[in-house]
Amino acid sequence: MKYICNVIKLIIVNTTPCTILYADDDSDDRLLWSESITMNGLHADMVYVANGQEAISYIQTTAANLPSLVILDLNMPKMNGKETLHYLKAHPYYQTIPVIILSTSDNQSEREFCTAAGALSYFVKPQSMSGYYPIVKACMPYVGGA
């Protein structure tokens, strides 16, 4: 009987979806992201917020179940992506959360700043849905889709 309980517990753990926190003030970009993860078969619970301040607030209130991945836009009101990245990487409890930057900026100094500050990857927002495929593919290892 004990063996059966352990097997059931293992199945429950393996089927629990991971959470991706996406911070972007542009609702069209959030919609494109949502459609692209569905089309590419990425299975994760999505949480959308409009700025870095809301992202940090969400993370602080869900400290027992941190997101598997945070995706940040750079240009947001209240608290931008660089400030949010800096906060997350400076905080001992949050610094291990993987962060990917997804921005309209193709500025090399922005890329260098973000990667030096601890972002795993930096992607320029694509102009088409097919352009999201490499970004979704880069996210898969962090949400159990690899």
Image (tube, rainbow, N blue to C red):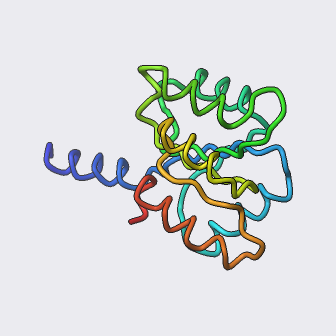
Q: Specify the farthest residue to the front.
A: 109
Q: Nearer the viewer, residue 10 or 23?
A: 23
Q: How many marks?
A: 0
Residue visible at 35% across and 54% down? 14
Residue visible at 85% across and 50% down? 26
Quarter of the image where the C terminus is located: bottom left
Q: Nearer the viewer, residue 125 or 17?
A: 125
Q: Nearer the viewer, residue 142 or 117?
A: 117
Q: From the viewer's perspective, is 138 left or right of 75?
A: left
Task: Please say if 124 is above or below 26.
Answer: below
Instruction: Indicate the quadrant where residue 52 lies.
Output: top right
Task: Please say if 22 is above or below 11.
Answer: above
Residue visible at 65% across and 44% down? 72
Q: From the viewer's perspective, is 105 left or right of 14?
A: right
Q: Specify the farthest residue to the bottom.
A: 130
Instruction: Indicate the quadrant where residue 29 lies.
Output: bottom right
Q: Position of residue 53 (x, y in %)?
A: 73, 26
Q: Position of residue 46 (x, y in %)?
A: 64, 50
Residue visible at 74% across and 33% down? 80
Q: Position of residue 96 (x, y in %)?
A: 41, 34
Q: Position of residue 107 (x, y in %)?
A: 69, 53
Q: From the viewer's perspective, is 62 left or right of 7?
A: right
